[in-house]
Every structure is written in structure tokens, then in C-alpha cells.
Image (spheres, rainbow, N blue to C red):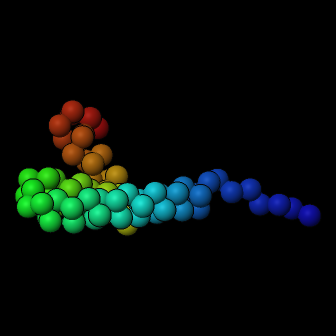
């Protein structure tokens, strides 16, 4: 009987999705608090952080590729 070993991709995907969604929930709750207090700068910062986190959670490969391309342009890598 042969048992297939996983390389961890499924676990990585699951952990990123769960952790990312928890982080997005925390950001949303805090953003509501900033909105209620009319703290517009903090609200905008939470929104931008949420966009970055959502990019990593829902499109991690695309986001990684984009950040790698930007780094290569900045650092002059190949």
C-alpha cells in the first residue's frame, strides 16, 4: 500500500485563508470604530491594509508575482 505524502501546499493555502480572514475581520471591526469616532486617517489606513491583506489571501500567487516584479525593478535583479 502506497501512501501519498503532501508537500504542504494544501495546509499553506488553508492557513493563509484562515489567518487572512481573521485579520480582515479584525480590521473591519477596528475600521467601524474609527468611522464612529470620525478618525478618517486611521480609517483610510485600515482600508489600505485590508486591500493588501485581501490581495495576499485571495490572490497570493498574483500578489507575490507583482511584488517580486516590483522588487526586481527597484533592486535591479534579474
- The foreground one among 5 and 43 is 43
Name the residue at the right extreme: 1
- In the picture, measured across the screen, residue 37 lies left or right of residue 5, that is left
Left or right? Give the position of 3 relative to 40.
right
Q: In this view, does 43 lie above or below 77?
A: below
Residue at image point 46% right, 57% down: 19
Q: Can residue 38 be seen in the rendering of this structure?
A: yes
Q: In the displayed structure, does residue 36 sit left or right of residue 59?
A: left
**Placement of the C terminus among the 4 image quadrants:** top left
Residue at 14% in and 65% down: 36
Task: Find residue 32 and report its image quarter.
Answer: bottom left
Picture coordinates of residue 43 (x, y %)?
15, 58
Query: In which quarter of the view is residue 47 placed?
Result: bottom left
Query: Vertically, is 26 above or below 77?
Result: below
Horizontal placement of 57 versus 4: left or right?
Answer: left
Query: Quadrant location of the N terminus?
Result: bottom right
Residue at coordinates 26% horizontally, 35% vertically from top-left? 77
How far across and how far down the image is residue 2, in percent? 86, 62
Q: Where is residue 66 drawn, in percent x and y?
A: 27, 53
Amino acid at each position: 500500500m502506497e501512501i501519498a505524502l503532501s508537500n504542504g501546499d494544501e495546509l499553506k493555502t488553508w492557513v493563509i485563508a484562515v489567518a487572512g480572514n481573521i485579520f480582515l475581520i479584525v480590521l473591519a471591526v477596528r475600521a467601524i470604530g474609527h468611522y464612529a469616532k470620525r478618525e478618517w486617517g486611521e480609517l483610510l489606513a485600515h482600508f489600505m491594509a485590508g486591500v493588501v491583506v485581501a490581495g495576499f489571501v485571495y490572490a497570493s500567487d498574483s500578489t507575490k508575482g507583482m511584488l517580486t516584479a516590483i522588487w526586481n525593478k527597484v533592486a535591479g535583479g534579474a
